[in-house]
Image (cartoon, rainbow, N blue to C red):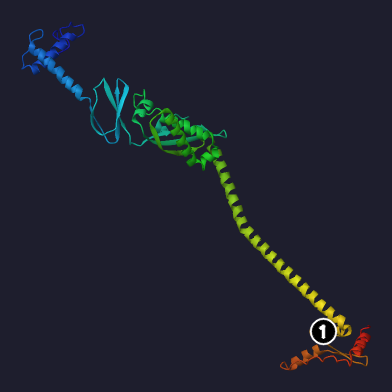
Amino acid sequence: MSQNDPQWGGRRNDGPPDLDEIIRRFTQKISRFFGGGRTPSSGRSGSGSTGLFAVIGVLLVLWGLSGFYVVDERENAVVLRFGRYVNTVENSGLHWHLPWPIERREIVNMTEIRSLEVGTAAAGGSADESIMLTGDQNLIEVQLEVQYTLNSAKDYVFNNRVNDPNGRDLIVKPAAETAIREVVGRSKVDYVLNEGRGQIAEETKKQMQELLDRYGAGVSIARVNISDVQPPEQVQQSFADAVKARQDRQRLINEGKAYANDVIPKAQGAAARLLEEAQGYKQRVVAQAEGDSARFKAVATEYSKAPQVTRDRMYLDTMQQIFQNTTKVLVDQKAGSLLYLPLDKLIQQTGADAPAAPAPAAAPAPAPQNPDSASQDRGARYGR
């Protein structure tokens, strides 16, 4: 039927459709379906009323059936009555609540590991979201990844997703930004860029959990990972030079430590050896001095008993020590002349003629007749 048909809703060609006529036609069709095909000519007949009540009953049944819902093992259901919290259904299975608009439900997955990113273009963040100020007044770009689960469906629905038509988490990301900026603001840029990533991530996780617990967000932070840390693009070359300088500095320090570890033990060993040698020399000298002293005391004791005999004996021992290492022989003669025998030359000549012939022994000095005369002769010979 065309909208320009005069019978369309009993309206004029230039007026709106007649709402009463539309309802009447719809009621007639429902009554025809439930009332055996009899169409009332005008008004409301008994069969038409019966059909209307049947339609209303079917609608009520469907409306009541809409209150049934299923909760999975991984989910919790938060039941709301006119927007006010009623209870949380944690048991899995089929459940029922008063149909909408009296009550409604919020199904929340409690075991799902949710994640969000801070400071990345994929997360829809702005260009300034990743720029942070360090404790030593340097700008740095930090990209953060957070993984979390839920511990309270009620807190999550009322304190985290409230007033958000898309059901997004409204607190977790601001809490992550606040925590990472606070931790980075207490750290130096070198610590953030190099060895401090793991510690910063742990401190950020702790700060986030404290903030979310304070707001009652019903969220448990599982993991915080710093995916990327770098200086701003405008100063990356300067930072690269600084990093290279630090690496060179560390390399030189390591080389110096290696050289020290090689030289110091050798020097300590040499010093210990010199100390041991000095200690040994000291003990030897002291022992020798003590021996000489003891021998001198013994000789002094004997000298006090027989001075002349002791002097003669000492003289003979000294001469024996002197002449046993020389090849020249001096023969003392009473006639006053000194005979010199070049035995070294004779031995060399004899050895050249007969190498197997033994060298002649030095003639011993003649023993004096008595000690006094021998002493007088030696004294006369050496001007004593």
Q: Work out which quarter of the rendered image holds the N terminus and state it.
A: top left
In the picture provided, is 280 more to the left or to the right than 228? right
In the picture provided, is 37 more to the left or to the right than 110? left
Compared to residue 217, the image places residue 40 above or below, namely: above
Give the total number of marks visible in the rendering. 1
Q: State the image coordinates of residue 36 (x, y, percent, origin top left).
A: 5, 17
How packed is label 1: few (under 14 Cα within 10 Å), some, or many (20 or more)?
Answer: few
Q: State the image coordinates of residue 208 (x, y, percent, origin top left).
A: 45, 33
The residue nearer to you, when weighing 226 against 234, is 226
* Disc 1 target residue: 317
Residue shown at the point (40%, 32%) measured from the top left = 123
Three-letter amino acid code of the residue under disc 1: Asp
Compared to residue 205, the image places residue 352 above or below, namely: below
In the picture provided, is 139 more to the left or to the right than 366? left
Numbered disc 1: secondary structure: helix
The residue nearer to you, when weighing 83 against 263, is 83
Q: State the image coordinates of residue 279 (x, y, percent, origin top left).
A: 71, 66
- Say if residue 35 shows up in the picture: yes
Residue shown at the point (81%, 85%) measured from the top left = 320
Q: Work out which quarter of the rendered image holds the C terminus and state it.
A: bottom right
Residue 117, located in which quarter of the rendered image? top left
Residue shown at the point (13%, 8%) measured from the top left = 7
Compared to residue 31, the image places residue 174 above or below, namely: below
The residue nearer to you, when weighing 120 against 381, is 381
- Say if residue 232 shows up in the picture: no
Residue 259, located in which quarter of the rendered image? bottom right
Q: State the image coordinates of residue 217 (x, y, percent, origin top left).
A: 39, 29
Residue 289, located in which quarter of the rendered image? bottom right
